[in-house]
Image: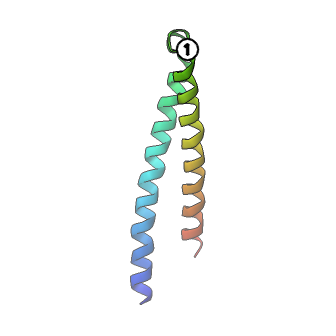
Amino acid sequence: MTGYINRQNENLLDNIIDRIEYFKGFISKIEEKLKNDSFINKAPESIIKREKQKLEDSKSQLLLLQEKMRTITNE
């Protein structure tokens, strides 16, 4: 049974790592967009707010995933 649980954790860990990499890339893209003066000057305030919210939400998700990964690897 232990081998099954370890394999299950391994699959879960692989999934978490993939999601962490996705969110890191996504966060990077949003940060670049928000640093772009052209975007900031041309985009409506509602779009800028939405991008900032997506950035904060993504950072929260990243932190949760990193914590899950620490929990799994410490078992």
Q: Residue at x 41, y 75 (%)?
A: 8
**Rendered view: 68 above or below 74:** above
Q: Residue at x 60, y 59 (%)?
A: 67
User: What residue occupies the far bottom of the structure in this picture?
Assistant: 1
Question: Quick one: quadrant of the N terminus?
Answer: bottom left
Residue topped by disc 1: 40
Residue 34 quadrant: top right
In the depicted view, which residue is nearer to us: 10 or 36? Answer: 36
Question: Quick one: quadrant of the C terminus?
Answer: bottom right
Where's residue 9, x and y in %? 45, 73
In the depicted view, which residue is nearer to us: 7 or 51? Answer: 51
Q: Residue at x 55, y 49 (%)?
A: 62
> Mark 1 belongs to which amino acid?
Ile
Residue 53 quadrant: top right
Horizontal arrangement in the rendering, residue 70 relative to residue 26 (left or right) = right
Where's residue 26, x and y in %? 46, 37
User: What residue occupies the far front of the structure in this picture?
Assistant: 46
